Image (spheres, grey):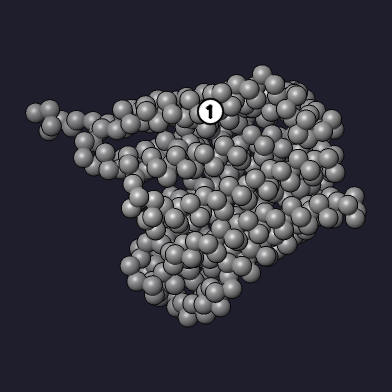
Amino acid sequence: MKRLLKSAFVKNTAILLIGTASAQAIQVLGAFALARMYNPEEFAVFSFFTACTSIILSFSSLRFELAVALPKSSEEAEQLVALSLRMLLRILGLVVLGIVLVFAGQSVLSYKIPSAILLVPVFTFFAGFTQILNYWSTRNGTFARNALSKISVAAVTVGTSLLWGFISEDPIGLIYGAILGQIIGWIIIGSNYSKLAIQAWKNLSNHDAKLLWKSYNKFPTYNAPNALVDNLQQYGIVFLLGIFFASEISSYYFQSLRILAAPLALIGASIYQVFYPKAAQIFHDTKNIRGYVVKIYAVLFAIGFPIFAILFLFTENIFVFLLGETWRMTAVYAHILIPFIFFNFLISPVSAVTAVVHKQHQSFAFSLVGLALKIVSILIGGFMNDPILGFTLFSASGMGIMLAGMLWYWYIAKERETFNDLG
């Protein structure tokens, strides 16, 4: 045990965990303070901006940054960094073109596009570049720099937003804070890597890029669409809410997710990191991890149920205390979403089963069905002019797809016997 505690793995994991937890704590505490500076209508622009950037970032480098840690040679890793940067710049070019087209054709849309969308490419460039460098830094073992970057992003973002709120009542300060935070994070993580990344980008030939694409084609083919659908499920709803309902409704939804989902995502991510390699090892040896899957479900239920039960029973008191009286309606929407978020908490760490048993295609189909159900739910609420109905259907359909997913994960966790095995 002493040897384990002194190991580099435990030390590096602890550094990253402390960095991530500290950054999330700053963000959540900052959200409480900012909610008392800005009302839901003012916060709607920031919700729209965050939804845009989160969705674009999910595929901004076509997920090639995830492959940076895989090659044995440092040279190939550098080439993957260069390819990731090349994809980021190309995606940003399409984003800029899309923004121009949206503004040109907004007269046919049912609501005015916020001018803050013009800042989306700026944020996405620095956040996307930092995202690439984070994976390169992880490969090179500079974990402390990763942790410092995450904490700095959160601190600068919240600090700038709060300072702007004291100086001016203009909610654009929320976006300026987010951009400045990403710039600082890029400077910290990129002080050792940015020049090398740019040089690698210049040196990357089209021939080498094609070879890399061929070798790592699963990342743009499967990982990128999966990430896009997952983020559309979480943030794409903001756009539908902006079309059918008053702007503050999207703020209620955004704040609900921010407070309920973000802190618990850290627990889920930690359990995922433990579950994934252990499940792979057990499945390799026995071809049956159903017992382990059930065990993880039980652990997640034991952790999550008391927390979500308290949130469900005292939603209004908790949210009014944390956010202030202006945000009382957030409690109504959070109360509806809590059961869905609880089921999502139960299933997310166990989603690694699909990678263990090579069922990513079917998992993507589940994600598409989930996205379709959520869109239909909000559309029904929108056409009925009843946001409560829309969110209720949203939560119920989400719970249904999560429950089906939990049962499916258990089912595929055991390799089925083939006809030859039976013979």
Residue under the image location 57 percent in, 37 percent down: 264
354 in relation to 23, above or below: above
* Residue 326 spot, x, y in % from top left: 85, 32
274 or 76, nearer to the observer: 274
Kindly identify the amino acid type of the residue bearing the numbered disc 1. Gly
* Residue 320 spot, x, y in % from top left: 78, 29
- Tell me the element at label 1: helix
278 or 251, nearer to the observer: 278
Quadrant of the snapshot with the C terminus: top left
125 in relation to 204, above or below: above
21 in relation to 74, above or below: above
Q: Is residue 339 visible?
A: no
Residue under the image location 39 percent in, 42 percent down: 274
Residue 67 left/right relative to 254: left
242 or 196, nearer to the observer: 196
- Residue picked out by circle 1: 304
Q: How many marks?
A: 1
37 or 220, nearer to the observer: 37
Residue under the image location 68 percent in, 47 percent down: 27
Furthest residue in direction top, as rendered: 313
Q: Is residue 157 visible?
A: yes
* Residue 363 spot, x, y in % from top left: 42, 38
Residue under the image location 32 percent in, 39 percent down: 279
Sort mark 1 into few (<14), some (14-19) or many (20+) by Cα contacts within 10 Å.
Answer: some
* Residue 161 spot, x, y in % from top left: 79, 53
Furthest residue in direction left, as rendered: 423
